[in-house]
Amino acid sequence: MSHDHPTREAGGESESVEAGRPGGRAARYLRVAVYSLGVLLALSLLTVGSIAIIAELKGTWHWQLHLETTVSYMAVFVGWVLAALVPLTVLLGVVRWREGG
């Protein structure tokens, strides 16, 4: 079985060497949170783009209405995602810089 980083046996369970370092487990959770929020941001922009393409192809007021409501709801959602993503990304950069890589 392939692992991204070495493991050691501890009490019958294998745990990551990264988790053994002070703050290693927190850094891993921070990285997962940043990547997850990044994926949510990308999927939201993909959703808006898809509806915009459909609205342009259909050219009806009905799809224009869908586009307007989707953009307004996604603007709120993306705002909240960015409010969390920007500080977490900066924090992740600081953690990686302090760890040396």
Image (spheres, grey):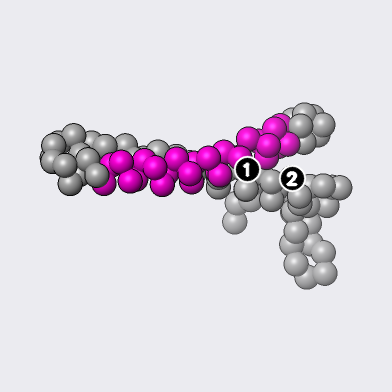
Residue drawn where x is 74% and y is 62% of the image: 14
Q: Which residue is mark 1?
A: 84
Left or right, 49 with respect to 99, comes to left
> Residue 18: in sight, yes or no?
no
Residue drawn where x is 82% and y is 69% of the image: 11
Residue type at the position of mark 2 = Ala
Marks 1 and 2, the one that precedes in the sequence: 2
Judged from the image, the secondary structure of the residue bearing numbered disc 2 is helix
Q: How far apart are the alpha carbons under marks 1 and 2?
A: 16 Å
Residue drawn where x is 24% and y is 44% of the image: 65
Magenta span includes 73 = yes
Q: Quadrant of the rendered structure where residue 49 is?
A: top left
Label 1 CA crowd tier, 10 Å (few <14, some 14–19, many 20+):
some
Residue type at the position of mark 1 = Ala
Left or right, 64 with respect to 75, comes to left
Left or right, 47 with respect to 37, comes to left
x then y, percent, for residue 37: 55, 45
In the image, 63 versus 3, the foreground residue is 63
Looking at the magenta stretch, what is its main secondary structure? helix
> Residue 98: in sight, yes or no?
yes
Nearer to us of marks 1 and 2 is: 1
Q: Quadrant of the rendered structure where residue 60 is?
A: top left
The stretch in magenta equals 66-93
Q: Which residue is mark 2?
A: 27
x then y, percent, for residue 29: 69, 50
x then y, percent, for residue 95: 77, 36
Magenta span includes 85 = yes
Q: Residue furthest right?
A: 22
Q: Quadrant of the C terminus?
A: top right
In the image, 2 versus 19, the foreground residue is 19
Judged from the image, the secondary structure of the residue bearing numbered disc 1 is helix
